Image (tube, grey):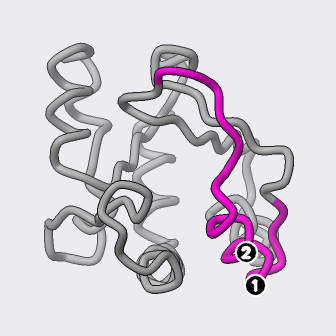
Amino acid sequence: MFRNLLTTRNIPGEWIVESAGSWVDKLSPATHEAIIEAKKRGLDLSSHQSKGIEGIHREKIDLFLVMEQGQVESILLDFPKLRSRTFLLSELAGISYSIPDPYVTGEPCAEIAAEIEGIIQNNLDKIVALAYKFGQ
């Protein structure tokens, strides 16, 4: 969603947007529900494969946005140098709370997707400003 907004709103810069999980054991495709929610938004997750945070170049990333407080704690425990660049996505909307993973909690994927989409859309300028700040 974030990558798509960067494009549609013509945000300048060389953006690399990646998705990584905190507790990923093996590569897995996106869930059927996630593919459906993405498709509703004109996005294609059919070739998406999950990967863990260990599999990305953490030192090159300007900003980490995570869904759950447990993810923040796990990342900072394993990678304490990322403290200044790691935020709950909800923090950008002004209220810090965990956004549940519907795969784990069974909550409706459509509601969670809409919540994430709303936070990203309403706070795009904040996200971009933070990424620019840490990217310098």
Label 2 residue SS? helix
Where's the N terminus, which quadrant?
A: bottom right
The residue wearing badge 1 is 40
Q: Given the image, on which type of amino acid does mark 1 rest? A: Lys
Q: Examine the rendered structure and indicate whether residue 60 appears above or below residue 39.
A: above
| Residue ID at (73%, 75%) | 36
Q: Position of residue 111 (x, y in %)?
A: 44, 85
| Residue ID at (53%, 83%) | 110
Q: Disc 2 versus disc 1: distance between alpha carbons? A: 6 Å
The residue wearing badge 2 is 36
Q: Examine the rendered structure and indicate whether residue 105 appears above or below residue 30.
A: below
Q: Given the image, on which type of amino acid does mark 2 rest? A: Ile
| Residue ID at (47%, 15%) | 54
Magenta stretch: includes residue 33: yes
Q: In terms of image quadrants, where is residue 26?
A: top right
Whether label 2 touches label 1, CB < 8 Å: yes
Q: Left or right: where does residue 127 sit relative to residue 46?
A: left
Q: Position of residue 10 (x, y in %)?
A: 79, 71
Label 1 residue SS? helix
Along the viewing direction, whichever of 128 and 86 lies nearer the viewer: 86
Of labels 2 and 1, the one closer to you: 2
> Which segment did they paint magenta?
25-44
Q: In terms of image quadrants, where is residue 76?
A: top left
How many labels were placed on the picture? Answer: 2
Q: Position of residue 33 (x, y in %)?
A: 63, 69
| Residue ID at (28%, 77%) | 93
Q: Position of residue 91 (x, y in %)?
A: 22, 65
Along the viewing direction, whichever of 72 and 85 lies nearer the viewer: 72
Q: Left or right: where does residue 46 sit relative to residue 49?
A: right
Crowding at mark 1 (Cα within 10 Å: few <14, some 14-19, many 20+): few
Res. 52 mark: none
